Image: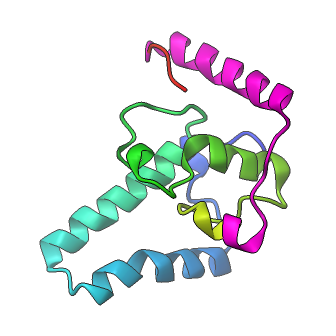
Amino acid sequence: FTAPCAWTSHAVHPVEMLLQSIGTMAGPLLFAFSLPQLWIWMALRQLQGVLDHIGIDCPFDPLHYIPGVGGTVFHDDHHRVFTKNYASCFSVIDDLFGTRYHPEESELERVRGEKAAAASVLGLGSVE
């Protein structure tokens, strides 16, 4: 999918789902989450997957404020450029492996303009 939407957040190859599941379950296993904590964690991970695929950078995305988390724009670039931004959540992984996409400034301005237009249509005000 070159233009992701929320309903495509789970359209992945089984191997990719397995690898993402390992990453998702590492925290609960390391910190011995209780069942309610596990449910909350899983709900947050699902929310993050959906928010990464809605196509706009929402100000209410809870992971937006955590350093090292790529966010919607980072993940959208993965769908547009296929050979970059492989990390599902932590963009620092792509920094370490040299696979992070660095768009030209003109391209960055165009994408910001498109996202701002989509946000205004949805009534989200100005978003970066």
Magenta span main SS = helix
Q: Residue at x 67, y 24 (%)?
A: 112
In x, y percent, where is residue 52?
54, 47
Report whether residue 40 is seen. yes
Residue 90 is one of the magenta-drawn residues: no
Residue 92 position (above or below residue 3) = below
Q: Nearer the viewer, residue 101 or 82?
A: 101
Quadrant (top left/top right/bottom left/bottom right) for the C terminus: top right
Which image quadrant for residue 37? bottom left
Residue 127: percent from the left, percent from the top?
A: 50, 23
Please name the residue shown 39% across and 61% down the image.
45
Q: Is residue 50 toward the left or the right of residue 104 in the image?
A: left
98 in the magenta segment: yes
Looking at the image, residue 53 lies above or below residue 13: above
* Count of residue discs: 0
Q: Look at the image and give the residue range highlighted in magenta.
A: 95-124
Vertical arrangement, residue 58 with respect to residue 33, above or below: above
Q: Which residue occupies 44% across, 52% down?
A: 48
Residue 55 figure quarter: top right
